[in-house]
Image (spheres, rainbow, N blue to C red):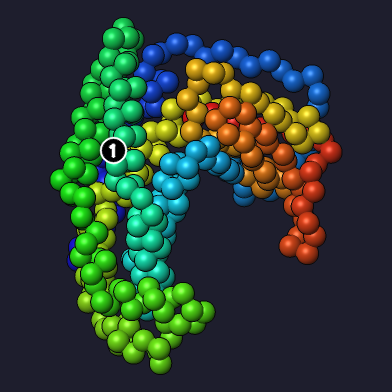
Amino acid sequence: MQRVSESKFTARVRKHSKHPGQFALAPAVPQNTPMVKAAPTTVSSESADRVSEYEQPLNERMRTFMRLEFLYQQMLYNYELEADWATRAATSSLLEILAILARGDIRADVNKELDRQLEVLKGYQSQPEVDSQRLDTLVRNLTASRTGLQAMGTHFLQSLNDSAFLSAIKNRSAIPGGTCEFDLPEYSHWLRQPYARRQQDLVNWLAIIQPLCDAIIELLWLIRESAQPLERLAIRGMYQHNMQKDVHCQLLRVLLPGGSPLFPEISGSQHRFTVRFLEWSTIEHRAVQTAHDVSFKISIC
């Protein structure tokens, strides 16, 4: 049975490649030891080895990319499940992806980001300590992604937009409970079809958007891996940072130990950002900023 999965490039690079900062094999600079004792955290034995990651996009392009990544991964997850409820969820994710893609020329934005990342990577080719084989692989595969996007054409969504079946589901989805059986009997009948029949339809729909979504996932992986995590200390739960003028930052990643009772609230722009650490107890009580100093890691990508 045919299966949609992450691109070969993404799987291969995640396994074998390092981020651009690791091409030059310079020794890491040790961080200063904080003078203030950090807030204690309670970590269970099961989650002690895990790390909780929180991300914040710093421009509209990254927000769009991350929303598409979220919906695409959600669709792939539900597509693989046999239950008709999972097929419903996968179809809903597809319609949300189409709604985002209808707002602007996302394909052009992905092409621009691919060009920018290729320029960054090619800049490492002149450095003496670069792993040229790994770098060439990255450049070659990003170039292939760009070629695939160009081959899609500007009207690649036309068949999905012209589908009366999907349009009916989309129109009724705006109504709470609007896709139940008596509203959309054809949709209900399709959901009763064998799993292989439903999955094949999902595969056909996925094939149309997959080159774009795979390229976005590859770009986000490269951006995430472009910076080393730095040790930082939030005084009484608050950390502020001013960017250097020549730094092109698109994404923040805050890392906390798994099982920590804290979570970050991140706000800012490409010039300055603030991280507040909140203490969470239960859903009945509102989270409040911790009064303790918090040791954490952050990647400015």
**x then y, percent, for residue 209:** 27, 55
Query: What x and y, as percent, mark residue 41?
Result: 75, 41
Residue placed most toward the observer, 51 or 251: 251
Q: Is residue 146 left or right of residue 247?
A: left
Residue 79 sits in which quadrant? bottom left
Amino acid at the residue labelled 1: Asn
Looking at the image, which residue sits at the far bottom? 182
- In the rendered image, is residue 221 in sight? yes
In percent of the image, x 43 and y 41: which residue is there?
61
Across and down, in percent, residue 214 comes to: 30, 47
Dot 1 lies on which element?
A: helix
> Relative to residue 172, is residue 30 depicted above or below?
above
Which residue is at the front of the view, 129 or 181?
A: 181
Whether residue 90 is visible: no
Q: Which residue is mark 1?
A: 111
> In the visual, does 128 lie left or right of 58?
left
User: What residue lies at 36% left-to-right and 50% top-to-bottom?
Assistant: 104
The image quadrant that residue 135 belongs to is top left
Residue at horizontal 29%, vertical 30%? 115
Q: Quadrant of residue 198?
A: bottom left
Is 31 rendered above or below residue 203? above
Of the 4 image quadrants, the one containing the N terminus is: bottom left
Residue located farthest toward the top when viewing the structure as drawn:
128
Residue that lies at the very extreme toward the front in this rendered image: 104
Q: Which residue is drawn at the image coordinates 21% and 50% (left, top)?
A: 154
61 to the left or right of 209 = right
- Check disc 1: other Cα within 10 Å, few if <14, some if 14-19, many if 20+: some
Q: Looking at this rendering, what residue extends furthest in the left direction?
A: 151
As drawn, 112 above or below 132: below
